[in-house]
Image: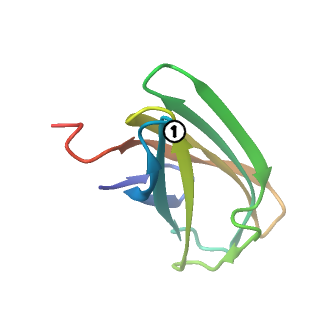
Amino acid sequence: MSKQIQDNCGIAIQVSTQYLQQQSDPGRPSYAFAYTITILNNRDQPVRLLSRHWIITDQNGKVDEVKGNGVVGQQPTIAPGQSYQYSSGAVLQTEIGDMHGSYTMQDADGALFDAPIPLFVLAVPHMLH
């Protein structure tokens, strides 16, 4: 499943998700998902990704909030017209959940701004119609 959004800050974010059956154990219950994020800089100057803020909600309404520097140990600078892609994962206690959040970015002048990450669904195949 893939979703893309373009917002007024000049950053487009595309998300692709995958259920990881081999790493899941429904008996526990534990459902593992991978997600790949592509961040495209549509601005006319480079931007640097400084930090992330995730809100992860499972089907039972349990909310986990994750904040941290960079993504996958990096704080990449993305040139105008270029993109940065990374993959990570999440483990839920239910078969369906969702994630959304934001990246704190810095432009070439040092100004900080938030690039919203659109809501996307994590779901075991055949759980959604």
Look at the picture and state if 51 lies above or below 127. Answer: below
Q: Residue furthest right?
A: 110
Is residue 82 shown to the viewer in this render?
yes
Residue 83, percent across and down? 53, 76
- SS at mark 1 in the image: strand
Q: Residue furthest left?
A: 129
Determine the residue positioned at 55% across, 56% down: 89
Label 1 amino acid?
Answer: Leu
Determine the residue positioned at 69% across, 62% down: 71
Looking at the image, how many numbered discs can be counted on the residues? Answer: 1
In the image, taking residue 25 as reference, residue 55 lies left or right, namely: right
Quadrant containing the N terminus in the rendered view? bottom left
Is residue 17 shown to the viewer in this render?
no
Q: Residues within 10 Å of mark 1 (few under 14, many from 20)?
A: many
Residue 112, percent across and down? 78, 52
Residue 121, percent across and down? 38, 41
In the image, taking residue 79 as reference, residue 33 lies left or right, namely: left
Q: Residue furthest top?
A: 61
Q: Which residue is mark 1?
A: 92
Determine the residue positioned at 77% across, 68% down: 73
Residue 122, percent across and down? 40, 44
Q: Quadrant of residue 21?
A: bottom left
**Residue in front for this viewpoint, 84 or 9:** 84
Look at the picture and state if 50 lies above or below 80. Answer: above
**Residue in front for this viewpoint, 15 or 91:** 91
Determine the residue positioned at 15% across, 37% down: 129
Rendering colour mode: rainbow
